[in-house]
């Protein structure tokens, strides 16, 4: 790796990234993600990760069908633990030491989230995977990513997606949508762009925490983002 811009980052991975056809956990896809992450970690970058659970459970859909919102959210948190364990397994098979910390205690399979312990793991070169969201319903994994990034002193959030940045509209529905290479926090909020939810965006804005949105399916993009290459879209102070 060349001279990198960031020495500690938080990588936000959606649940869909674990699935080949939108559901379940695909071992091959998870291994590819782990290889990209391990490459950057071996170069000395501290990496914390927040995973989603949409490939297993989508609370919003069940809430719309009549399920209690808090119950649906708790079930979604458990889904993120499954993805976290799958990613940890893939990383460990590659020789990359990692730890899973959960906001909901489940001592038999993961550590509880303890900020100082998480920072210590990062200092020792371990990859830390945060699961079970914040431990509270009504908060998304976007908010978890912003919160954990601030807590562990990450210098940026790398938001891995299926598209190569932020667009003026959904490029799948609007072929004329244009990519926005750089925005400030208020611009994202005022335009209602679906980068992260408003709670997460406000937390990033309050702490001047930049967000880099990029396509994770392109090999080497995590490394490029860490090195400060102009990939995807950048959200930061005005």
Image (spheres, helix red, strand yellow):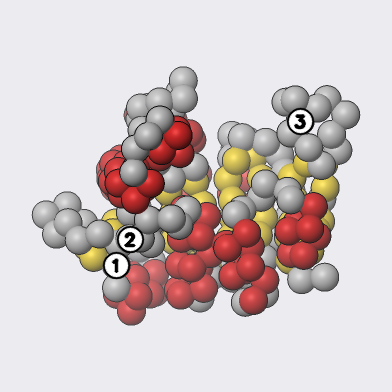
Q: Dot 2: within a 10 Å radius of its alpha carbon, few (fewer than 14), some, or many (20 or more) residues?
A: some
Quadrant into which the C terminus falls: bottom right
Q: Name the residue under label 1.
A: 113
The numbered disc on residue 20 is none
The numbered disc on residue 135 is 2
- Mark 1 or mark 2: which comes first in sequence? 1
Left or right, 9 with reference to 52: right
Residue at coordinates 33% horizontally, 60% vertically from top-left?
Answer: 135
Circles 1, 3 touching at the beta carbon (< 8 Å): no
Residue 28 location, x and y as percent? Answer: 39, 27
Circles 1, 2 touching at the beta carbon (< 8 Å): yes
Q: Nearer the viewer, mark 2 or mark 3?
A: 2
Left or right, 103 with reference to 220: left
Quadrant into which the N terminus falls: bottom right
Q: What secondary structure is marked by label 1? A: loop
Q: Name the image quarter holding residue 4.
A: bottom right
Left or right, 175 with reference to 134: right
């Amino acid at each position: 790796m060349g001279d990198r811009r960031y020495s500690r980052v938080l990588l936000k991975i959606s649940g869909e990234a674990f699935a080949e056809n939108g559901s379940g956990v695909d071992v091959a896809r998870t291994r590819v993600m782990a290889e990209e992450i391990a490459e950057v970690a071996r170069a000395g970058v501290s990496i914390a990760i927040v995973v989603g659970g949409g490939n297993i459970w989508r609370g919003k859909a069940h809430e719309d069908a009549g399920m209690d919102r808090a119950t649906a959210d708790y079930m979604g948190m458990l889904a993120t633990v499954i993805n976290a364990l799958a990613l940890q397994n893939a990383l460990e098979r590659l020789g990359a030491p990692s730890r899973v910390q959960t906001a909901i205690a489940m001592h038999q399979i993961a550590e509880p989230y303890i900020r100082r312990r998480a920072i210590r793991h990062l200092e020792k070169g371990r990859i830390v995977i945060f699961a079970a969201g914040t431990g509270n319903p009504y908060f998304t994994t976007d908010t978890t990513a912003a919160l954990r990034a601030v807590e562990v002193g990450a210098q940026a959030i790398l938001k891995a997606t299926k598209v190569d940045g932020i667009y003026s509209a959904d490029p799948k529905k609007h072929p004329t949508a244009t990519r926005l290479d750089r925005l400030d926090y208020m611009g994202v909020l005022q335009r209602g762009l679906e980068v992260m939810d408003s709670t997460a965006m406000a937390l990033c804005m309050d702490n001047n925490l930049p967000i880099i949105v990029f396509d994770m399916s392109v090999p080497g993009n995590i490394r490029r983002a860490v090195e400060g290459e102009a990939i995807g879209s950048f959200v930061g102070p005005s």
